[in-house]
Amino acid sequence: MNTLIDLFKLFKKRGSQDVFVYRTGIRKFKFTYSDLYSLSLKMSSYLLAQGVKSGDKIAIWAPNDPFWAVSYFGIILTGSIVVPIDFASGRKRAETILKLSGAKFIIQSLYKFEKINPQIGLKTVMIEDLRFLLKPIKPIEKLFGSKSSDMVEIVYTSGTTGDPKGVVLAHKNIITNMLQACDHLAMSKKFNFLSVLPLSHMMEQTVGFLVPLYRGDKIIYLRTVKPTAIMQALKEENVAVMLVVPRFLSILKNTIERGLSSKGLLYLTRFKITRKIIAKSIHKKFGKDFEMFFTGGVGLPLDVFSFWKGMGFRVVEGYGLTECSPIISANSFDRQIPGSVGRPLKGIQVKLDNKEILAKGENIFKEYYQSPETTEKAFKNGWFKTGDYGHIDKDGYIFIKGRKKDVIVNASGINIYPDEIENVINKIKGVKESCVIGLEKDEGEEVHAVLILKNKDADPRRIIKTANEKLDPLSQITGFSLWNEFDFPRTTTLKIQKFKVKERLLNENKKTKNDLTADTLISLLMNVCKREENEIKENSILTSDLGLNSLSRLELINYLEQEYRVDLEDTIINQATTVADLRKLLEKRGKTKKQKGLWSWVNNPFGKEIREILDIVLHKPLSYLFVNLESVSLSNLKNVKWPVVFISNHVSYLDQPVIMYSLPRLIRYKTATATREEFFFTEKRTSLLKHILFLYAIVAFNAFLLPQKRGFRKTLSFMGGLIDTGVNILVFPEGTRTRNGKVGPFMQGLGLLAKELQVPIVPIRILGMEKIHPRGSWLPKKGKCKVIFGKPLEFTTETPSEIVEISRKAILNLTAN
Amino acid sequence: MLGIDIVYLPEFEKKLKNLSMDKVFLSNELSQNKSSESLAGIFAAKEAFFKAIGSKMSWLDVWIEKTKEGKPFIKSVLIKENQKTEVSISHAGDYVIAVVIIRD
């Protein structure tokens, strides 16, 4: 195997084996290897039609998504070059990279607020639109004949001064590292990977993407990477491997410890036996197949490693740089040495030069894009100078002592570059020199600034405040110290030795460190509401006292979610919420009430059996007494892709059973029905009869509740779950039985439902029931009923109200003749 | 029922830059509206809608679409089928304002 195109050819043979699961929070969309194969060929064809030629640079500025993979291979198959851009970075950085690389095309996302507008010489497409755009396209027939030494990707990393540097990677660099990583980790079983770190970083791309694709594993992507989505995926998808940054592990450790200590159980982790019991409950949350975390990027603190090891988790730490595609060394699946980044991968030579780590191998890049000077500085006699310092023990294990870039990586894997922050601070009046480092703190540390002032009168708090106003919200400085010496410790090349600064800070008395405020919540509120600390009291009302408006509420919730790793609806803050209320809510960790009337067991074989028996002994004979039933145009269901959503006009309470009996038996018992919540439960007390009716409707008719006021999205996820397990759904979009015999207006939720569920909609028209059992009547009369099935409708880019309109027309068009 | 909301564009742009957009906007709102002015208008209209119904609900339970002529209309899962909604959005310089009426 020499090129990524060779890797791609493997996909065809794997056929219907699953490659991706895309979890939207509502549905799980599956992609097979042959889907990936044919979609990528179509993507190539699309790009060629857009005028892309081999050698062109094409940027991907989008979140992890199966279509990121499709774009990646689509680009490579045309012989053009992938330029990944971190989705978390702002438009300015994206524009810089576009300019530096000379990209002709950019694949971006609807979900980014700042977009790149198409301009002369730069075309663009939204990754979300590819789902529909690629459908009608004819795949290319001939793959580009790339050589292994051809450039295939340019990955931009931050330079210590000025513009980012473009690391040019050839097919052979990436393929070599991919094979080396597979060989080193030596995991024989097939694994499911959960991919949450950005694919624009080489660590996720090689270890979390190409390795599993080569091995024939499955990768899970999340539309929204949030804590509950991660935990749910771990539990439901049998995840075995997850790539994380150390910060993720330390935050999760804090969350677990906080949970234990709030129950007074933290001391149990100290004893071996009790720790085992706790470990068991934690393992349960990770699912039965969980095997390991793979981590890298920055050093993994020893206490974090020990905690997870103590809980029986395998944490495999590796080391690498983008320039090395990226892995240089890693611990192995069977053996992890605390504090070490493991042994070099097979085929990579590593040596020390004055403690600096140098590396050599096929995985190492050739040059920085259009930058021969920087390239020359990066090598010494053919060895790549990593700029990191460390030592190697007699068994060949590498221990890192200091890193050149000292990148701070936050929990979501987003890189914060200290040099960019230093540049801002150093321009502020009163500052002589500064050094920004990442410091661990129990609750969201991140960015710590160490200042040397020009004179004693300068106010460091004012300096930090000024800097924070200029900085990106992601790179806000959260603490500072003063350095009372003339200068920082420096290397012979006059670079600040940050690890020495950090070491000294950690050893020194804690008093010298100044947190902007000790309390995370208060500091977030200060930042969001632009208030001073003394203005924020525990009984301050967020809206009226602190001036929180709808926008800053969103911003606050976003910060809280990142800090406390909880999912929050911004509706938790209302007109009367105080700081103390919010604190309490956070302690409860945003737990929400379970929604009523969503039972999934009724769709298991047992539930089906109950329904079938009830039908045979009771419901069917009853219905024969009154209804002379005829189903019309059932043939429209012949070539349908199951499952579907049935929509029908609503005439009587007996519509549901009548539709069921006109469906073939196999479909009948695999169909759930949405029922209006307000029918059973209103604001008034619900009568016992209605409670019993409600239970009967769920068990005997496979009903679930569709609320009108609150919780529409929760019901939507429930429906997504039904569809994922192959269950059809019947909805009466009028929401209520007709009053005048005509088809009434449709509920708007139908539009959202069709867009989110992405399954065919089958229109149904019921005729005759208005005579058999009209609104207001008690006992049904005998009569004829026709149930007419229409052609399935499929929706792509229509708006919700267009979907409602088209669906309603489709039902109206179904007539008796 | 009546609701009104005003949005200050520079603040909107600054804050939305770092937020996950799928918390506030539906995909069709994002694909139909690329400029920050029109997204700010949608945001204001949603907030005005919540003021009109008198409580804060999920941003995704209400959405804005446009007629062929470009006139916005507002739809929601939070109101009854027989209730009618109207919306009007206006821009001037750094400000965007929206008014929503819900009638039975």
Image (cartoon, rainbow, N blue to C red):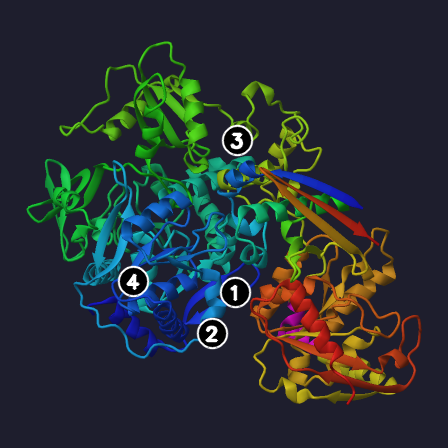
Tell me which residue sits at (83%, 83%) in the image. A623
Work out whether residue A770 or residue A445 is closer to the camera in this orientation and state it.
A770
Check the image and report above or below for A326 versus A753: above
The residue carrying mark 2 is: A135
| Horizontal arrangement in the rendering, residue A505 relative to residue A695 (left or right) | left
| Horizontal arrangement in the rendering, residue A436 relative to residue A653 (left or right) | left
The disc placed on residue A527 is none
Q: Which is more N-terminal, label 4 or label 1?
A: 1
Q: Which residues are magenta?
A: A601-611
Q: Chain of mark 3?
A: A
- Which amino acid type is shown beneath numbered disc 1? Lys
| Horizontal arrangement in the rendering, residue A139 relative to residue A711 (left or right) | left
The residue carrying mark 4 is: A187
- Which amino acid type is shown beneath numbered disc 4? Met
Mark 4 or 2: the one toward you: 2
The residue carrying mark 1 is: A28
The residue carrying mark 3 is: A524
Element assignment for label 1:
strand
Q: Which is more N-terminal, label 4 or label 3?
A: 4
Q: Chain of mark 4?
A: A
Q: Main secondary structure of the magenta part?
A: helix
Are there few (<14), some (14-19), or many (20+) residues within 10 Å of tag 4?
A: few
Q: Are the residues flagged by discs 3 and 4 from a single subunit? A: yes
Give coordinates of residue A211: x percent, y percent. 30, 62
Image quarter of the C terminus of chain A: bottom right
Mark 2 or 3: the one toward you: 2
Work out whether residue A799 or residue A299 is closer to the camera in this orientation and state it.
A799
Give coordinates of residue A558: x percent, y percent. 53, 41
